[in-house]
Amino acid sequence: MPPPTLLFDIETVGLPFDSFDEAQQEYWLRPAQREPTEEARAVKREELIQQLNLTPLTAQVVAIAMVNVDTGRGKVLYQAEEPEQSKSEDGLVEFISGTEEELLDGFWDVITKFDRFVTFNGRGFDCPFLMLRSAILGIKPTRDLMPYRYDAKRHCDLADQLSFYGAFTQRRFNLDFYCKAFGIESPKSKGVSGLDVNKLFAEKHFREIADYCLRDVRATVQLYKAWQQFLSFEQK
């Protein structure tokens, strides 16, 4: 019997820039000062502000999608202004809204029930983000999401596995590219990508973010199954 396996993905949004004090703002924008002209510095400052969503010190978790690889059942926990609860069209996935703290508490509760977890680039983003953001909010992680990198038995990061731990040094491919190569419908096929999340959150389109996060996870499940079938040499 394969171990119970959970596949998850997160979406994040930068905190308001004016929520940081003057010293923090100066530190974040410091790279812009190296630009040669004021016009270039202004462009760089805008670019840096758009990048706030990339670190747990400057961003919040707004959605976490989780699916049991074997059963297809799961949850999407997401931030919304009002309490919301519903199910996906196929009835397999629950959508539950809450505060960021409630999202994180819910995630850490769910993951304790699984022996293995799968991500796409989780080591490079989702896992350290979840752990550090939880600590900042006073929440104790229930699992170490960053175990030994070169053993996929606990954490299978498909970005590592499909690049053979960086053997392909020419280019690092994203989930969209891998999905299209393997004939899997891309989560971006509905016209939403990770680049749209900040705007969707600002416009209060919370469920759209949750739906996109679930599409990411379901596409990654298919990619994981392709990896298992053709590229994994683990003993059954």
Image (cartoon, helix red, strand yellow):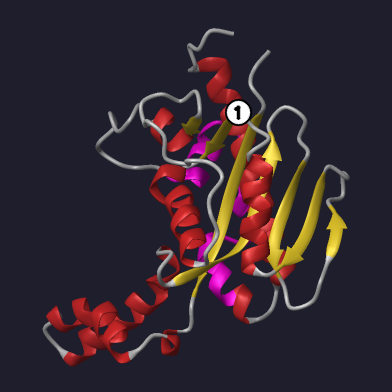
Farthest residue, direction top: 235
Which quadrant: the N terminus? top right
Residue bearing mark 1: 115
In the structure shown, which secondary structural element does the residue marked by tag 1 occupy? Answer: loop
Against 36, residue 180 (above or below) is: above
Q: Position of residue 171 (x, y in %)?
A: 30, 41
Rendered location of residue 89, percent (x, y): 87, 50
Q: Specify the segment rendered in magenta.
A: 174-199
Q: Is residue 4 above or below residue 64?
A: above
- Say which of 16 and 21 sits in front: 21
Q: Which residue appears at 62% of the width and 74% of the height?
A: 200
Instruction: Give the crowd class for mark 1: few <14, some 14-19, many >=20 residues within 10 Å.
Output: some
Quarter holding the C terminus?
Answer: top right
Q: Is residue 190 magenta?
A: yes
Dominant SS of magenta comes to helix
Type of amino acid under label 1: Asp
Q: Residue at x 65, y 17 (%)?
A: 2
Asked if residue 185 can be seen in this view, the reply is no
- Location of residue 19 (image quadrant): bottom left
Tell me residue 40's x, y (percent): 21, 84
